Image (tube, rainbow, N blue to C red):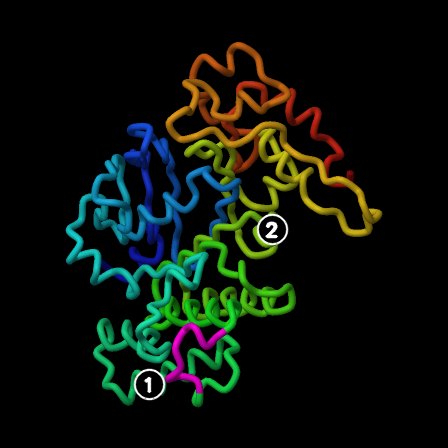
Amino acid sequence: MRMAERSTMPLIEVDNLGVRLNTSRGPAQAVRGVSFSLKRGETLGLVGESGCGKSVTAMSLMGLLPDSAVVTGSIKLDGSELAGLADADYCRLRGNRISMIFQEPMTALNPMHTIGHQVAEPLRRHKNYSASQARKETIALLDRVGLPDPARRVDAYPHQFSGGQRQRITIAMALACEPDLLIADEPTTALDVTIQGQILDLIADLVEERGMSMILISHDLGVIAENVQRMMVMYGGTVVESGPTDEVFRRMGHPYTQGLFRARPKLGARKGTRLKTISGTVPELADLPAGCTFSARCPLVIDRCRAALPPMVEVGPGHVVRCVRTDVSMAENVGALSA
């Protein structure tokens, strides 16, 4: 394939992705009909409450779902199909062309190995670095993600670091081989606000410098607004709204997106001010309704919402919403950004 052709085609293409998991209550459709594509250097944010399907979607791209999971649809990397790929073939991609920053560093790091060994492993496996080369690069990576005195601490074990430091180490692991696609699942969960900004800036710089694509998963709408070009709002395993980030924030069309925005803390609010909440809870995967997944919590619900999963409706350039009452929800949302 010529380089000009490669640069214009999507790096990652996901078409009608479905994931069925076995749970204690029987089979559950964790992801339904998710589709998107990313070119090299593009960034995408996934937003939604816990249990909405964000991390399962990411695990699908990494080939890290349970053996009992049933995956339908298509996942292509540079035109090559990944759905159904043998694990041995996926191992050549993980940590090399596709990497992931996991949300919980304690489960991502092996307590039996030094951090230097763990950061160096993808360099030895995928880039055939010698032990001395890998060690030198590991120290440089740890220094870049802000770990204090990396040359001295490279031989320390995970339990000897704070939660924030462990998260930095997992970021260094994910970035070691300069992947084509970086998936960041709540990458700054364990960090304070100041360090969070530094790490997000670092990730953004690396994405731009190295032409990586990035999928950023976050509950924080502010993080999404500042760090990705496009965003998808997920609920009940499906995408309820997607589009260019600026466009989605300017014209939020789905009641769920509006609810997430209104629930955010407001700068300058008086002490003791209660945050607005979305009534109800996220449904269990085994209890998803036949119609709109948000219908049980939506203030605009009508009988038609419960009949079938609504189709996507275009409400702006590249901006689509899965709602049968988009006209009403958007009319009621006028002025929400300034509220």
Q: Write down the region rendered in magenta.
A: 153-161
164 displayed left or right of 2 = right
49 displayed left or right of 336 = left
Q: Residue at x 53, y 21 (%)?
A: 295
The amino acid beneath tag 2 is Ala
Task: Point out which mark residue 239 bears.
Answer: none
Where residue 88 appears, x then y in whole percent? 15, 58
How dense is the environment of label 1, judged by Cα within 10 Å: few (below 14), some, or many (20 and up)? many
> Which of the image's four quarters has the N terminus?
bottom left
Magenta stretch: includes residue 310? no
Q: Residue at x 65, y 40 (%)?
A: 261
The amino acid beneath tag 1 is Arg
Vertical arrangement, residue 171 with respect to residue 84, above or below: below
Q: Residue at x 44, y 79 (%)?
A: 142
Task: Point out which mark residue 225 bears.
Answer: 2
Q: Residue at x 57, y 33 (%)?
A: 316
| Viewer-nearest of discs 2 and 1 | 1
Figure quadrant of residue 99: bottom left
Vertical arrangement, residue 165 with respect to residue 136, above or below: above
Secondary structure type for disc 2:
helix
Q: CA distance from mark 2 to mark 1?
A: 36 Å
Where residue 244 appears, x then y in whole percent? 54, 44
Q: Nearer the viewer, residue 130 or 102?
A: 102
Where residue 154 appears, x then y in whole percent? 40, 83
Which residue is under mark 1? 135
